[in-house]
Amino acid sequence: MPYEASPTRYETMRYNRCGGSGLRLPAISLGLWQNFGGLEVFENARAMVRQAFDLGITHFDLANNYGPPPGSAEENFGRIIARDFRPYRDQMIISSKAGYRMWPGPYGDAGSRKYLVASLDQSLRRLGLDYVDIFYHHRPDAETPLEESMAALDHIVRSGRALYAGISNYPPETTRQAAAILRQLGTPCLIHQPSYSMFNRWVEDGLLATLEQEEIGCIVFSPLAQGLLTDKYLRGVPPESRVAKPHGTLRQDRITEETKTRIEKLNWLAADRGQSLAQMALAWVLRQPAVTSALIGASRPEQIENAAGTIEKLKFSEQELAKIEQILRQ
Ligand SMILES: NC(=O)c1ccc[n+]([C@@H]2O[C@H](COP(=O)([O-])OP(=O)(O)OC[C@H]3O[C@@H](n4cnc5c(N)ncnc54)[C@H](OP(=O)(O)O)[C@@H]3O)[C@@H](O)[C@H]2O)c1
C-alpha cells in the first residue's frame, strides 16, 4: 500500500518561528541518531517516520555519523523518502551535520572547508536528495579558524546544497562570533542545536540569552535525557531500552538511586498535571521563549505519539515550576 499522509496532520501541531527567520519548525522534531541505523529493523524506522509526519512533525534531524554503522541512518532515511515521501519533500525540513570523525585521515573530521563540503556531498548521496534544508557544523573546532568553517557553511548554502546554515554545541561567545561572521557573509545563522533537559541545564547560563539577542532559533537535543526523563527506568532496565542495547549511549550508571528518586517525584507531578513525564519534560524545555523545537529520539511509534501529545498542555503554573526546581535541586 503506498503511504498517504494523514489529512489531519496539520491540525494540532504547533509551528514556532525559528529565530528571526521566515522558517517555522514544529514544536516537536524527530532525530534519527539512534534506532534508525543499519542494525535496526527497517520497517520500524519507516513506521516511526510515517507516524511523526502524520502528527505534523515536519522536521527530521540527521548527521553524517548517525547509525551505527555511521552513515546508515541517512541511507535508511533515504530509502524511506524514496518509498514514501517523494510527494511530500516540500513539506519536510531535513537536516544533516558534519563535525565528528566520519572517515580516516585528516579530512574526515573537525571543521575544515574540505571536510564539511565533502561530508555534505556524501550525505546527499546517502539520502538521495539534491539538498538538505539545514546543514550544521556539528561541534566547535578550536584548530580550524572559525572564519573557514563559517565560509564553508556560506558556500554550501550558496551552492544550493543546503537552504540554511546552523551550528551545534557551540558555547555562547563562539556562537556570537560565528553569527557575526555568517551575517557579514550574507548567510545568517538560522539555528543552534544544543543539549537541554531538566537534567542538563548548561544553556541557561548564557546561551539562550545569546540566541535571543542574535535572533537565532534553538532546537534542543536529548530533552528526555536519552529516556531518563520518562517512567521507563523506574522498575529496572527494560530489555529493548537504550541502556540495554550494546551500542546504546546511555550507561546504566546514570540511573542512580538519587536520580530514580527525582524521576519518581517528577513522574507524580506529571500525573497531577494529567500528562506523562516525557510530555512534562518536553513542555518544560519548550517553556523557554528562545526554544523553537524539542528534538526527541524514539524507538517505537507510540513514543512519538506520546511526544506529540505534549502540545495539549504546555503551560506551567508558578507553583509547578517551583516544585520542579525543588525536585531537581534535592
Ligand atoms: N547535535 C548533537 O550533538 C546531538 C547529540 C545527540 C542527539 N542529537 C539529536 O537529538 C535527537 C534526540 O536525541 P535523544 O535520542 O538523545 O533524545 P531523547 O528524546 O532525550 O531520548 C530519546 C529516547 O528516550 C526514550 N523515549 C522517548 N519517548 C519516550 C516515551 N514516551 N516513553 C518512554 N521512553 C521514551 C527512547 O528510549 P529507548 O530507545 O530506550 O526506548 C528514545 O530513544 C537525536 O536523534 C539527534 O537528532 C544531537
Image: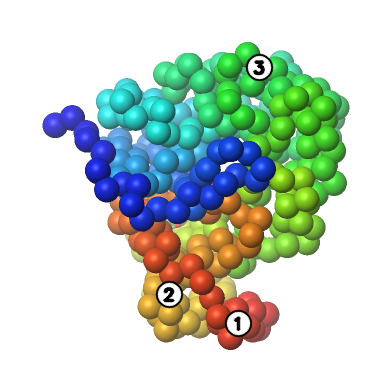
Q: How many marks on residues?
A: 3
Q: Residue at point 50% right, 62% down?
A: 282
Quadrant of the drawing holding the C terminus: bottom right
Nearest to the observer: residue 65 or residue 308: 308
Q: Could you tell me residue 197's position as x and y percent?
A: 60, 62
Q: Which residue is mark 1?
A: 318
Between the C-alphas of marks 3 and 2, the distance is: 49 Å
Front of the two marks 1 and 2: 1
Q: Which residue is mark 2?
A: 234
Q: Could you tell me residue 168's position as x and y percent?
A: 67, 41
Q: Amino acid at mark 3?
A: Arg
Q: Amino acid at mark 2?
A: Leu
Q: Amino acid at mark 1?
A: Glu
State whether residue 217 is above or below residue 243.
above
Q: Which residue is mark 3?
A: 158
State whether residue 264 is above or below residue 142.
below
Describe the element under mark 1 as helix, strand or loop. Answer: helix
